[in-house]
Amino acid sequence: MFEPEFIIPVVAFLITLLIVLTRHQRAMAELIHSTHNAQQNVATATEMQALRAEVASLRESMNATLIHRDDDRHSGLHPQLGVNSAAQTTEDVRVQGKA
């Protein structure tokens, strides 16, 4: 039953089959992982684009706020009190002159 004329071709066929199946499994694994990595890259790129847009929006908002504050300072308004700093100094001079 286990004659060498029978066993040698069967073992050779099984080794060949094992090699083919291993190559196929490796190729399928590479395909699955490359697809997964591509999906992750797309998701990462989309998230990065959203974060960059948010940072740009925040930067524009900060710049607008700073420009608005600079305009208030140059117009003579006190930034916290909202009154004209020139009028405030005139009142302070009058009060100091009476005292």
Image (cartoon, helix red, strand yellow):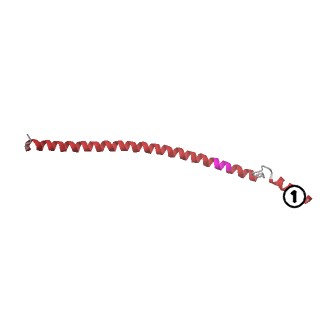
| The stretch drawn in magenta includes residue 19 | no
- Residue 34: quarter of image: top left
Pick whichever, 73 or 22, lies toward us.
Answer: 22
Magenta span of residues: 61-65
Residue 64 in percent (x, y) is at 66, 48
* Residue at the disc numbered 1: 93
For the C terminus, the image quarter is bottom right
Residue 23 in which image quadrant: top left
Indicate whether 70 appears above or below 28: below
Q: Work out whether residue 90 or residue 3 is closer to the camera in this orientation and state it.
A: 3
Instruction: Identify the main secondary structure in magenta.
Output: helix
Residue 60 rendering spot, x and y as whole percentages: 62, 47
Helix, strand or loop for disc 1: helix
| Farthest-out residue, top | 1
Q: Amino acid at mark 1?
A: Val
Left or right: residue 94 versus residue 56 is right
Q: From the viewer's side, name the closer residue of 12 and 4.
A: 4
Question: What residue do we see at 18% from left, 42% from top?
Answer: 14
Q: Position of residue 86 (x, y in %)?
A: 82, 54
Q: Is residue 6 left or right of residue 98?
A: left
**Quadrant where the image shows the N terminus:** top left
The structure residue drawn at horizontal position 43% and vertical position 44%, both measured from the top left corner, is 40
